[in-house]
């Protein structure tokens, strides 16, 4: 099972939804055709604002150009050819040319509240064995077991935490609290069980979330709380919902800190920005920002997030 693992300028809603429309459904796939390179017009923009990135170096093999004031660059490309984009203040972007319908290149900004080390810990957390971005690509259903449903406070807190998880995605990944998820849906079962083998043997932990992710796409899992008190704590419930999104435990203080802290009951600005950026990338994106191998065959895997809590 392995050892448990103990950037956001405001943009307009239409722009944000347009960005997510391209990225949230699973992202790029391998090109279906190849051919001789022909001139292609590319546009390099910032993932947080959608504004052009001037002065970026865009290269493919021996070709290298610098983007103009409008973020434009022209290269001779065929489907499957590699593209590398380097720009100050952004992660190095390594991708491939896929088609003429995919010529806008979104860069991942580096911010004071979302530095590289933070992103590597939060988005590319070490429990994912191949080190790739892992997230759901469809609605998430939070199944409350009878023990949770029977506790009014715990049930309400789980619903609030689910709403916060949905909100941090810009409402692009619905989180629905239910008794029974539809067949085949991404379902996270929420339960109270002090006799869970891990919690029983590790009294310093308050909750444990287990997720499965074939192909780096989260397909289901469970969250188990030690008791009603823990299941009724918003700081802990919101933290566990973050794991359902694929987030790890960054050392930077916030909702997703290695120890769930009472003073954080919602995502910080840096965490919220990171979530919005990760939704622009397909599951399987590799750090810091490389999707060249996305779509390659991947075995089913799972991760376990064991979480202490400081009330």
Image (cartoon, helix red, strand yellow):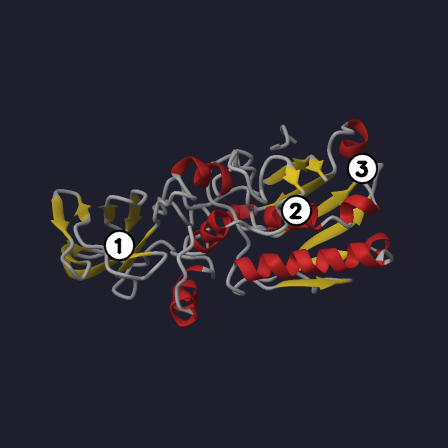
Q: Is any atom of residue 130 visible in this view? A: yes
For the N terminus, the image quarter is top right
- Could you tell whether 192 is left or right of 31 in the image? right
Identity of the residue drawn at 24% across and 47% down: 85
Residue linked to disc 3: 196
| Image quarter of the C terminus | top right
Name the N-terminal-most of marks 1 and 3: 1
Cα gap from disc 1 to disc 3, whole angstroms: 48 Å
* Callout 2 crowding tier (Cα within 10 Å): few <14, some 14–19, many ≥20: many
What distance separates the C-alpha of mark 2 from that of mark 3?
16 Å
The x, y position of residue 293, in whole percent, is 38, 45
Q: Nearer the viewer, residue 293 or 2?
A: 2
Q: Earlier in the sequence, mark 2 or mark 3?
A: 3
Nearer the observer, disc 1 or disc 3? 3
Q: Is residue 186 visible?
A: no
Circle 3 SS class: loop
- The image position of residue 164, as x and y in percent, is 61, 58
Mark 2 residue element: helix
User: Which residue is pictured at 24% across the width and 48% down the height?
Assistant: 83
Q: Determine the image quadrant of residue 98.
A: bottom left
Mark sitting earlier along the chain (1/2): 1
Residue tagged 2? 240
- Left or right: residue 177 versus residue 45 is right
Which of label 2 and label 3 is nearer to you? 2
**Disc 2 and disc 3 in contact, CB within 8 angstroms:** no
In front of the other: 72 or 158: 158
Foreground pick, 161 / 18 = 161
């Amino acid at each position: 099972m392995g050892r448990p693992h103990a950037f956001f300028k405001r943009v307009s809603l239409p722009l944000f939804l347009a960005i997510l429309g391209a990225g949230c459904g699973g992202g790029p796939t391998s090109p279906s055709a190849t051919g001789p390179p022909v001139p292609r017009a590319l546009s390099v923009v910032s993932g947080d604002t959608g504004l052009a990135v001037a002065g970026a170096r865009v290269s493919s093999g021996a070709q290298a150009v610098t983007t103009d004031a409008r973020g434009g660059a022209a290269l001779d490309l065929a489907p499957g050819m590699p593209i590398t984009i380097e720009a100050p203040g952004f992660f190095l972007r390594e991708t491939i040319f896929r088609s003429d319908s995919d010529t806008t290149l979104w860069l991942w900004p580096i911010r004071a509240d979302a530095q590289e080390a933070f992103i590597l810990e939060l988005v590319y957390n070490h429990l994912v064995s191949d080190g790739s971005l892992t997230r759901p690509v469809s609605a998430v259903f939070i199944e409350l077991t009878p023990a949770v449903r029977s506790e009014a406070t715990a049930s309400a807190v789980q619903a609030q935490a689910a709403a916060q998880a949905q909100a941090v995605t810009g409402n692009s990944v619905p989180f629905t609290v239910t008794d029974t998820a539809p067949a085949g849906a991404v379902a996270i079962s929420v339960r109270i069980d002090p006799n869970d083998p891990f919690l029983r043997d590790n009294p310093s932990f308050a909750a444990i979330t287990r997720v499965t992710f074939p192909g780096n796409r989260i397909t289901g899992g469970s969250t188990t709380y030690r008791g009603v008190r823990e299941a009724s704590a918003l700081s802990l419930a919101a933290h566990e919902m973050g794991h359902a999104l694929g987030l790890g435990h960054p050392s930077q203080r916030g909702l997703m800190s290695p120890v769930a802290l009472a003073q954080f009951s919602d995502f910080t600005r840096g965490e919220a920005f990171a979530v919005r950026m990760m939704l622009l990338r397909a599951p399987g994106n590799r750090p810091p920002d490389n999707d060249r191998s996305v779509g390659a065959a991947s075995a089913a895997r799972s991760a376990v997030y064991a979480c202490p809590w400081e009330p």
